[in-house]
Image: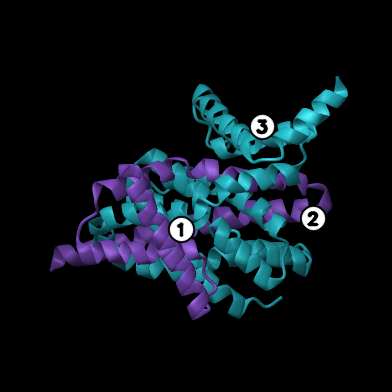
Amino acid sequence: MNNAFAELLSVWTAGPMLSIALTLAAFLAANWLFARFRRPLWMPPVLIAALLLAAVVALSGIGFEEYEQGARWLTVLLGPATVALGVPLYQQMHHIRALWKPILVTLPLAATLAAVYALGIAWLMGASPLVLSSLAPKSVTAPIAMGIAEQLGGSVSLTLGGLLITGVLASVFVDWCARWLNIKDDRIIGFALGLNGHAIGTARAFEISPTAGAFSSLGMGLTGVFTALFLPFTFPF
Amino acid sequence: MVLLRGFLVLVVFFLLGEALRVLAGLPVSGGVLGMVMATFTLMLRGQVSDELAEASRGLISVLVLLITPGVVGVFFIVDQFYGHWTTVIVALIAGTLLSVLTTLWLMKKVSESSAGENSHE
């Protein structure tokens, strides 16, 4: 019985289909659970899906390496999906034109501070250079952040962990702070979500409205480009 | 067929982005460069085709699905950074709160003052 199961598992994991099925199932289950629990901000679908998948992958004996290899068939689509963000960006261009000044003023400062605040605190707490360089691109969208972390000599896995935590926190904090500062403009909320919370923030912004989503894509894209160009030249550790 | 045509456009822009990244030696990902190129192309054309709009809406709606496998990996490195997590989490919580506040506050201030200027014109 055990042998048959092991054989089945090795057949299933030979191709990518098992990983794809598990990921799709976790995604759908996470969306269902998320709606069921009245959309808790601190527990976005991506976190629910990842927890479910991590449990299944660890308990079933598939192993993360096997899973990841199969799931690559899905993750390669991140490239064209990033390109796809250009379409809402174009469709919302009239909003962006209207707000070009605050965007231009805020972006360099806020994108720099997004890295500097966390790095400063970590440095004061005595973090090692490895941890610092892994956290530096914490507000940048995953494919760019991985590149930056490698360039600075950080750990890509730790960077992804930092990205996850940052994305979830940014979604929660933008909600709190916008209410506190009495900001109701979807454009500002969206921009702050994308700038601080990269793709997780952008997924959240598209839940608010298409305008918030477009501004979030803009914030994410600009922060990514700005940080990728700026950070490797100024990182002191 | 309609969706495939839109998808082809997205993939081609991704490949162009990768080409620009490699040929110009830029430290920015091909996806982001492709996004910038696609946006500029659409601005020059002044319109977006239904098939491209449809394909991009489809992909954006599953963005979370595409990020998930990378996020799963985080749970398998928890041990590897044992002892660093307190620092990491404190820095991320405080740092993100501060930077979110800064962003919102700056955007609000600057957009209020530029809106004020416009109304004086």
Q: Position of residue A178 (x, y in %)?
A: 42, 47
Among the chains pictured, the one given cyan colouring is: A
Chain ID for label 1?
A
Occupied quadrant, residue B13: bottom left
Q: Position of residue B64 (x, y in %)?
A: 52, 42
Occupied quadrant, residue A168: top right
- Residue displayed at 53% across by 79% down: B25
Mark 3 — residue? A52
Q: Is A111 on the left-hand or right-hand side of A94?
A: right
> Mark 3 or mark 2: which is in front?
3
> Mark 1 or mark 3: which is in front?
3
- Residue displayed at 65% across by 38% down: A19
If the image is split into quadrants, where does the N terminus of chain B sit?
A: top left
Report the amino acid beneath label 2: His
Query: What's the CA distance linking mark 3 and mark 2?
Result: 25 Å
Tell me if residue A231 comes above or below residue A8 in the rendering: below
**Chain B pictured colour:** purple
Mark 2 — residue? B84
Badge 3: how crowded within 10 Å, few (<14), some, or many (20+)?
some
Using the image as rendered, state which of residue A28 and residue A21 is in the foreground. Answer: A21
Task: Name the colour scheme.
Answer: by chain
Mark 1 vs mark 3: which is more N-terminal? 3
Q: Is residue B108 visible?
A: yes
- Residue displayed at 43% across by 40% down: B61
Query: What's the CA distance linking mark 1 and mark 3?
Result: 27 Å
Report the amino acid beneath label 3: Leu
The answer to whether marks 3 and 2 sit on the same chain is no
Mark 1 — residue? A220
